[in-house]
Amino acid sequence: MALNASSHNVTGDKTTPNTAPPPELSGDVKNDLLGAANADATGQHAPGRENDKNVEKKEKSAKELEKERKKAEKDAKFKAKKAAQAGGPAKETGGGAAKEKKKKGKEEEQLPKYVEETPKGEKKRLKSLDDPFTKAYIPNVVESAWYEYWEKEGFFKPQFQDNGDVKPAGHFVIPIPPPNVTGKLHCGHALGTALQDVLIRWHRMRGYTTLYLPGCDHAGIATQSVVEKMLKRRENKTRYDLGRSKFIQRTMEWKEEYHEQINNTLRRMGGSFDFTREAFTMDAALTEATTETFVRMHEDGLIYRSNRLVNWCTQLNTALSTLEVDNKELPGPTKLSVPGYERMVEFGVLTHFKYAIDGTTDQFIEIATTRPETMLGDSGIAVHPKDERYTHLVGKKARHPFVDRLMPIVADDYVDPEFGTGAVKLTPAHDPNDFNLGKKHELEFINILNDNGTMNKNTGQFAGQKRFDARYSVVTQLKEEGLFVKTEPNPMKVPICSRSGDVIEPIMKPQWWMRMKALAKPAIEAVEKGDIKIKPASSEKIYLHWMNNVQDWCLSRQLWWGHQIPAYFVKIEGSTGDQNDDELWVTGRTEDEAKSKAEKKFPGKKFELARDEDVLDTWFSSGLWPFATLGWPKQTTDLEKLFPTSILETGWDIIPFWVARMIYLSIYLTGKVPFNEVYCHSLIRDSEGRKMSKSLGNVVDPVDIMDGITLQKLHDQLRAGNLDPKELTRAEKYQKTAFPQGIPECGADALRMALVGYTTGGGDISFDVSVIHGYRRFCNKIYQATKYVIGRLGDSFTPRGKIANTGKETLPERYILHQLNIAAKKINEHLEAREFSLATQVAYKYFYVYLCDTYIENSKAIFDEGSEEEKESAKQTLYTAIEGGLTMIHPFMPFLTEELWQRLPRRQADKTPSITVASFPQHTQEFDDETANAEYELLVDSAKGLRSLTAEYAIKEGGSTYIQALNDATHSTLSSPTSLPSIRSLAGKTVSDIKILSPSDSAPSGCAVYTVGSSATAYLDVKGRIELDKEITKAQDRLVRANETITRQRKIMDDEWEEKVSDAVKEQEREKLKTAELEARNWEASIEQFEKMKLE
C-alpha cells in the first residue's frame, strides 16, 4: 500500500516520485505482508533468503538433511504420479510470473491446470482439504464456481418485503459509474468496483435492500475514434466508405465484444451486480430517456440553437466541450507534434507584422499574434482609447495585404496597451475574446477554415493549405511584402484535444446549447444545504468552484456513434431558410410529434423536415444515469422504491464532466437529488508516482494481477497496441523495472483488499503490485487458520445456536471474544465514515494478530493439555472467532470467505445458504471485556518481548528468561495458574524457562532487556552467549537510530500536520513514534546491563 505519505497531499494533487507506506497496523505491518507469511508459504512464490545480505547461511543438521531427503522423495513421487496422469512430463503451469527457483515441496507449481467439476450455477462441490488443490490457498481454485452460484440463486437482486416495500433497514443503491466500451478495464475501474462492492455487501449483510446496478457507457468520441482507426488499419476504409447505418452496426458489433470482456472482469472482481438490470446508454430505455430530456428541456427554453464559437477538433471532425480540452502550458518557443503533419509545428512565438492604413502610403499599424495564419480572417483592429500612439488612427481602416478587405480600427477598454504593440488584430470567427469584441463593434465574422483544418475560399491564395502550413506561408509572404517586423518568445497555453492530441481551433458553428445559470442554482444549494454530501472536502470545493463559474454547455457532436439529436429543421417551401435560426427548428419524441409541432408553428405552410445529423455529447445521456437506469421517465417500481440512490463513488477528476451534470439534471427532471452522497476516490499512479498512461507502459489490467502474467506477455500486449516505437521502448523499459519477473498470480480477494486498503481519503495512490501479492499471503494465512480450526473442531462438533457468554470462558477466550466485538464495532464505524483503509487495517489485525498469531497459538495448549470441558469451550469460542472473522472480512474478500464459511458447520437452526446473505457482526455490550483484554495483552506483550529477545540475540534453544512485574496487579496477573502456560505457548520453542519475578525481587543480571509497557520488564539471560563489545556497539547504533526516528517523528507531528493529515496517516505516524520510543528504552536498558557485565 504505497501511498505518498511523505507529502500528505490532498486528493487530486500530484504525487512526488518517492513513495512511503500508507497507514499501517504497526510499524512493521508491511513487513508482515511481504515477509512474515513466508513461514507458511505452501504453494506460494516465496524465494529463499540464503543469499540475502547479512543473512548467514546456516549449516544444516543431520536431522534436517534427513527430513529434506524424505520430503524430496515424496515430491518426486507426486510429480511422477501427476505426469503419468497427464500422459507426459509434469510441467509448471499457471499464468503467473516467470518462476523462481524454488525449494522442494512447493506443490502448487507442479499441479496440472485446475478444472472445476461443479456444474455451472450449482453450489460448489468442495474438495477435501487434503486434496493437492486445496491443501493451500490457490486463488483460481478458491474463486471458481462461486459467482455463477451467487447469480443463479439471485443473492444480488434487491430483496423486498411481501408488501413490495424495501426492508425495514432501508435501501442502499449504487449505480456503477459506467465504464466506456472502448476496451479493457484498468486498475482505476478495479478500485471503484472494490470500494463500491464493499459498501454493497456490507449493507446487504446488515439487512438492507441493496442494488448494485451494472452497465456501460457508449463513449461517443472515444469509441468512434477507436473503431475508425481499426477500420483504417484492418480494411483501409473510412466511416464514409461504410455509410452511417453500416458504421453504427459495425461499432455495435465491436461494442458487444468489449462489453462482454468488461462484464467478465467485473464478475472476476466479485462485484455483486444484478445483471438482470444491466443498462447501456444506447439501449432502448436510456435512448427514450435521452430523447425525453432533450425535447422537454427544449420545450422549456433551456436548450437552444446558436451559431457560436466551439472547440473544434480537425482530427475527429467534431466540436468538444471545454472539459475535453487540455491546455498545454509552454514557457516559450516550443515545437509540438501535431497529427497530420510530418514536421513539428512551433508554438510560443509572438509574430509582429504591419497593416497599411487605407488611403496612405506611409502609415502603418503594427500588431502581434501567436497565430499568424488567423490574420487571413481579421476583420478589425482594436486599440485602447487612451493609448496616445493610436488615437489618430481610431475610426480609420487598415488594408489587408492578401485579400480584398478593409478593417476598421476601433477603441476598446478591453485592450491591454502594455501587451505586444498595444494594437490587437480581431478575428471574431476564430477567437473567443475577439468574438465578443466583434459583436460589440459589429465587425464581420469571417470563417477561414474547412472542418478538416484546411484553409477555405475566404483565404484567397492560401486556400487548400493545411492551417499550420499556412502559418509558415503567411509569414513568408509578409516578409516578401515588407510587412514582417520580428518574432519574439511568448509564454502561452495551447489547447489540445484530450482524445486525439490535435490542436483545437475555435470555429463558428451552429450548435445546440444548454442554458446553465438556472440549472446551476438549485444544484449548488443541494450541496451547500447538505442534501448531498461530497467527500473529501477538497472534492466539494472542486464541485462548487465549477458550478459557480459554469458556462452554457455545447451539446452537439459531429459524430455518428451516439444519440442522434431529436431536432428537425423545417424547410419551408419557397424559402431558403437559415439553419442558424432557432425559430426554424422543432423537436419531437418522434418524427410525427415534430411534424405536428411544425404544423402548429407554421400553419398553412408546406414544408419538409430534415433531422439534425449531429449526436449529443456523451455526458448528456450519462447525466441521466442514476434515474434512467431505474426506469425514468416511466414511473417504475424501482424508481419509486430505490431512488434517490445512496452513494456515487467515483474519481474526483470527473466532477465537472459527470457528477455536476447528474445533480442538476436529476433535480430538474425528477425534483430529487440523484444520490445522497458522493465519495471521490484517489487516482491511481504507478509505483513511481506517475499518472497511468499506455505510452509509459504502466497501465495494468486487473485480470493480469488476478491471474498473473509473464513479463514477455506484458511486452506482447504493448506491441499489439498502437504505440509509436519511442513510446514502446520507454514502456517496455518501465515494465522490466516494475515487473522483472512478470506479475505473480494474486487473485481477486488480494487485489480487492489491497485497493480498499490504499483508500485513505488523502492523496493519489502509488500502486505497487508487490503489496497486492503480500495480501495473497494474507489470504493463505486466513486459509490455513480456518483449515486448522476445522481440524480442531472435528466432524462431531455442533456450534451453539446463539453466540452467548456461558461465564466459564477462560481468559484467552474472553480476550478473543472482546477483540472480535471491538473489531466489529470499529469496522462498522469506519465503513460508515468511509474510512476504508482503517476498516481493512482492523480486519487485518483481528485476523492476523489477534486470531492467528495469538488466540489460535494459545488454543493449541488447551487442546493438548486441557480438560474435556475446557476443550469444548475452546472449540465454541474458536468457532465464533473464525465465523465472526470470515463474515467481518467478507465484504473485502468475498470468494475466500465464501469458500471457507461453507466448510464450517452451521449453527443450530441456521439455514443461511451463503455468506453473502449472512449477518454482519455487530457490537454487543455483553462481550466488552476490557479487564480480560488488559490482562491478556500483558501476557501477549510479555511473550512478544521474549520472542524479540531470543530473535535479536540468535538464541535458537534453551533460552532462560524472566518477567518482572513492576506493580502488584501485574504480578497477580502473571502469577495466575493459566498465565504461564499462555506465555509459554505464545513465546515459542526457543524459550525453555520462564521465571516470574515480583516487584520486590532484584532485577536479574547478565541479561538483555525488553520493556513490556509500563507494567513489566522481560529479561533474557545472555551470559556467555554473546560478544559484549560487539553487542554494545550494535545497541548504541540502534539507540542512535531510534532517537533519530523519535526526533523526526516529533518534528513532523506539529499543529499544521494535526490539522491537514488524515486519521489513517496520523495513526501510522504515531505508531512509528511509539515503536521508536519503546526501542530506545530497550536499548538503553540493555546497554546498561552489558556494561555491568563487562565489570564483573
Image (spheres, rainbow, N blue to C red):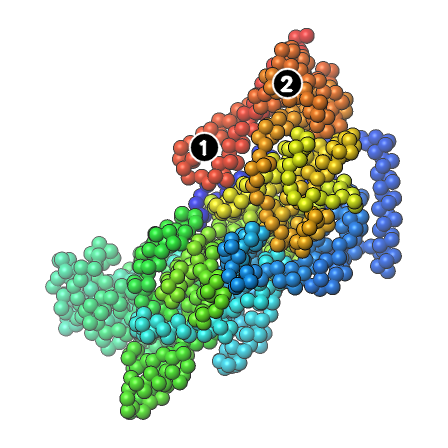
1093 to 533, vertically: above or below:
above
Q: Which type of secondary structure does the marked residue at label 1 adopt? A: helix
Can see residue 698?
no
Q: Which residue is mark 1?
A: 1052
Number of other residues with Cα within 10 Å of mark 2, as a class: few under 14, some 14 to 19, many 20 or more: some
Q: Is residue 105 something that shows in the picture?
A: yes
Q: Quadrant of residue 211?
A: bottom right
- Residue 8, image x and y in percent? 46, 41
Which residue corresponds to the image point at 36% horizontal and 88% vertical from the top-left?
608
Label 2 to label 1, Cα distance in Å?
38 Å
State the image coordinates of residue 209 (x, y, percent, origin top left): 54, 57
Going by the numbered disc 2, the residue's amino acid type is: His
> What residue do we see at 84% from left, 54% from top?
82
Q: Nearer the viewer, residue 1027 or 783?
A: 783
Three-letter residue code for mark 1: Ile
| Residue 151: mark in rendering | none
Q: Furthest-top residue in view?
A: 1096
- Left or right: 330 in relation to 779: left
Which quarter of the picture shows residue 1026?
Answer: top right
Category of crowding for the residue at label 1, using alpha-carbon neighbours closer than 10 angstroms: few (below 14), some (14–19), many (at least 20): few
User: Does residue 922 lie above or below 933 as drawn?
Assistant: below
Image quarter (top left, top right, bottom left or bottom right) of the N terminus: top right
How many numbered circles does the render carry?
2
Left or right: residue 959 versus residue 33 is right
184 w.r.t. 753: above or below: below
Please name the residue that numbered disc 2 is placed on.
971
User: Residue 30: x percent and y percent?
Assistant: 60, 39
Residue shown at 14% from the left, 65% from the top: 393
Q: Does residue 267 appear left or right of residue 1051 in this picture?
A: right
Residue 553, x across and y down, in percent: 35, 66
Q: Which quarter of the rendered picture does the C terminus lie within?
A: top right
Please tell me whether mark 2 sits on a helix, a strand or a loop. helix
